């Protein structure tokens, strides 16, 4: 957790080498740009980028970040609940409202109805 520190403004490429990270809490810092530098962090299951200027790149999150069922199947568990968490604000939060996952009825459900 490195939330609410006074890091100099930078993109997320600093975290690219840490491919085994599971959670990344960066809220309240001067990070900006895209989530693209995190594309190879395949174990990532939680990200907090609230109150940052990270504003794009949902499509670059690891494929299994949004595919909870596949993760559960890989582990051999059935009937359990698995979650992935993405805390964000601003432009990225607005994009997430419209984000659809192919062939996933829970993710594509119209929650406004």
Image: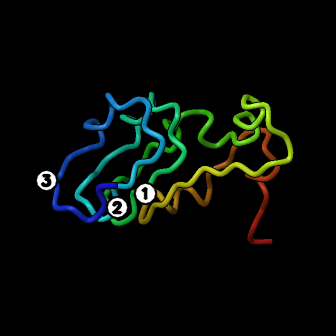
Q: Seen in the image, is 106 located left or right of residue 91?
A: right
Could you tell me how far apart the alpha carbons at marks 1 and 3 are, in whole angstroms?
Answer: 18 Å
The tag on residue 27 is: 2
SS at mark 1 in the image: strand
Residue 81 in the image: x percent, y percent? Answer: 75, 51
SS at mark 3 in the image: loop
Could you tell me how far apart the alpha carbons at marks 2 and 1 are, in whole angstroms?
Answer: 6 Å
Residue at 53% across / 39% down in the picture? 59
Q: Nearer the viewer, residue 18 or 63?
A: 18
Q: Is residue 95 above or below residue 64?
A: below
Marks 2 and 1 in Cβ contact (< 8 Å): yes
Chain-order first, disc 1 or disc 3: 3
The tag on residue 48 is: 1
Sort mark 1 into few (<14), some (14-19) or many (20+) by Cα contacts within 10 Å. Answer: many
Chain-order first, disc 3 or disc 2: 3
Image quadrant occupied by the C terminus: bottom right
Sort mark 3 into few (<14), some (14-19) or many (20+) by Cα contacts within 10 Å. Answer: few
Marks 1 and 3 in Cβ contact (< 8 Å): no
Could you tell me how far apart the alpha carbons at marks 3 and 2 are, in whole angstroms?
Answer: 14 Å
Chain-order first, disc 2 or disc 1: 2
The residue lying furthest to the bottom in this view is 113
Q: Seen in the image, is 92 located left or right of residue 69?
A: left
Image quadrant occupied by the N terminus: bottom left
Q: Nearer the viewer, residue 10 or 44?
A: 44
SS at mark 2 in the image: loop
Give the quadrant of residue 38.
top left
Sort mark 2 into few (<14), some (14-19) or many (20+) by Cα contacts within 10 Å. Answer: many
Q: Is residue 88 above or below residue 68?
A: below
Residue 61 in the image: x percent, y percent? Answer: 51, 38
């Amino acid at each position: 957790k490195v939330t609410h520190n006074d890091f100099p403004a930078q993109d997320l490429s600093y975290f690219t080498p840490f491919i085994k990270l599971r959670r990344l809490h960066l809220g309240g810092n001067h990070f900006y740009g895209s989530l693209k530098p995190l594309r190879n962090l395949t174990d990532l299951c939680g990200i907090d980028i609230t109150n940052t200027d990270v504003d794009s790149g949902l499509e670059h999150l690891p494929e299994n970040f949004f595919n909870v069922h596949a993760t559960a199947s890989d582990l051999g568990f059935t009937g359990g609940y698995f979650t992935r968490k993405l805390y964000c604000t601003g432009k990225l939060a607005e994009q997430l409202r419209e984000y659809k996952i192919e062939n996933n009825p829970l993710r594509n459900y119209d929650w406004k109805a």
